[in-house]
Amino acid sequence: ASNFVAVDGNTYTADITPDGTGDITIDVATAAAQDGAGNDNMAATQAVTLFDNTAPTVDIQGEPALVNSTASYNVTIEFSEDVTGFSLADISVGNGSASNFVAVDGNTYTADITPDGTGDITIDVATAAAQDGAGNDNMAATQAVTLFDNTAPTVDIQGEPALVNSTASYNVTIEFSEDVTGFSLADISVGNGSASNFVAVDGNTYTADITPDGTG
């Protein structure tokens, strides 16, 4: 405390300078002063002020890594503490748009994100989009990124000979233009022959042995 001023016989003022984050408490103990009859004062009820200069953080949650249509998906935007002033306009979406903004509670908000088309869909919440109870602006969120991909993978069959003269097996490679899942031996249709010894080399490359049935 500093700059103590006696305003009149029962009123006094002082400046309080906080040291740092945490509760700032002010006390006046018993017998700090006496009235005209010599009676000591009673202790004051402690005055408490919270010192808070910590910026709220914000986290964008629930975005898928990959989508293949323009159907909307829902994300949650969660602040580290209750804030005010946050609205739909504070959600910046690249290659898409936000709608259906809902304030779930003081620190949790949701919105629907609708992709525009192929490419990265980005979601940002900038610095100072909202403020906590002490007036501190939020920090910027880490950008949330979702890849929009509605391009069908292509597939190429490689290594087949132009001509064979026996029913001996030969090996072919089946290569997709990108990693795929769900591909199996049953997906290889062979006319006048059969496939066996299916091997997944990696996410986009597979091999199989082809055994001819006969002439044709």
Image (tube, helix red, strand yellow):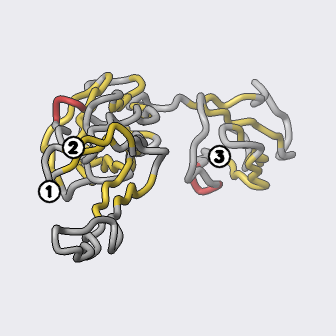
Residue identifier under label 1: 10
> In the rendered structure, which amino acid carries the disc numbered 1?
Asn
Q: Position of residue 191 (x, y in %)?
A: 60, 45
Closest to the observer, 112 or 15: 15
In this image, 120 relative to 30: left or right? right
In this image, 186 relative to 167: left or right? left
Q: Is residue 98 visible?
A: yes
Residue identifier under label 2: 112
* Secondary structure of the residue carrying numbered label 3: loop
Picture residue at 24% right of the left edge, 72% below the top: 41
Q: Position of residue 70 (x, y in %)?
A: 25, 35
Q: Is residue 146 visible?
A: no
* Position of 123 relative to 60 (above/below): above
How many discs appear? 3
In this image, 53 relative to 170: left or right? left
> In the rendered structure, which amino acid carries the disc numbered 3?
Asn
Q: Nearer the viewer, mark 1 or mark 2?
A: 1
Crowdedness near tag 2: few (<14), some (14–19) or many (≥20) residues, C-alpha within 10 Å = some
* Position of 131 relative to 159 (above/below): below
Q: CA distance from mark 2 to mark 3?
A: 52 Å
Picture residue at 34% right of the left edge, 54% below the top: 50
* Secondary structure of the residue carrying numbered label 1: loop
In this image, 171 relative to 15: left or right? right
Q: Position of residue 106 (x, y in %)?
A: 22, 55
Q: CA distance from mark 3 to mark 1?
A: 109 Å
Residue identifier under label 3: 192
